[in-house]
Image (cartoon, rainbow, N blue to C red):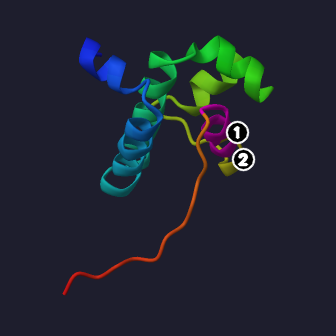
């Protein structure tokens, strides 16, 4: 990861935009990659495991390219990052 992206991923507002973009514009795998990047740039997997009461190995597996984490796992991770998941209506630009 580039140093400038690493720095940007420490800004909560940038992180929210980054993850939303990955969620809306990419595949689930791309979202999990973005989530891994945020974790790496901030507290790291070991600290996240302690904060979420999830095993470090379980987190690595859940967020791997072949991972398929449960919603509760993603929700715990997002919460530990100081973020929340929200749903918004689709606005059709006609």
**Residue at screen point 42% across, 36% down:** 15
- Say above or below: 94 vs 76: below
Provide residue 21's location: percent of width, then percent of height: 34, 49
Q: Choose top left, top right, bottom left or bottom right for residue 34.
A: top left
Q: Secondary structure at mark 1?
A: helix
Provide residue 75's location: percent of width, then percent of height: 66, 45
| Quarter of the image where the N terminus is located | top left
| Residues marked 1 and 2 touching at CB (< 8 Å) | yes
Circle 1 sits on which residue? 76
- Closest to the observer, 70 or 25: 25
- Quick check: 2 left or right of 14? left
- Say above or below: 21 vs 54: below
**Residue at screen point 34% across, 26% down:** 8
Most prominent secondary structure in the magenta stretch?
Answer: helix
Q: Is residue 2 visible?
A: no
Circle 2 sits on which residue? 72
Provide residue 24's location: percent of width, then percent of height: 36, 57
Q: Choose top left, top right, bottom left or bottom right for residue 61.
A: top right
Number of residues whose C-alpha sits closer than 10 Å to that of mark 2, classed few (under 14), some (14–19) or many (20 or more): few
How many numbered discs, if any?
Answer: 2
- Closest to the observer, 32 or 83: 83
**Magenta residue span:** 74-81
């Amino acid at each position: 990861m580039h140093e400038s992206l690493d720095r940007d991923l420490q800004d909560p507002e940038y992180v929210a935009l980054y993850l939303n973009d990955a969620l809306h514009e990419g595949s689930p795998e791309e979202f999990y990659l973005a989530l891994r990047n945020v974790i790496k740039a901030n507290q790291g997997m070991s600290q996240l495991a302690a904060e979420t009461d999830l095993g470090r190995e379980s987190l690595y597996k859940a967020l791997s390219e072949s991972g398929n984490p449960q919603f509760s796992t993603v929700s715990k991770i997002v919460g530990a990052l100081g973020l929340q998941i929200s749903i918004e209506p689709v606005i059709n630009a006609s």
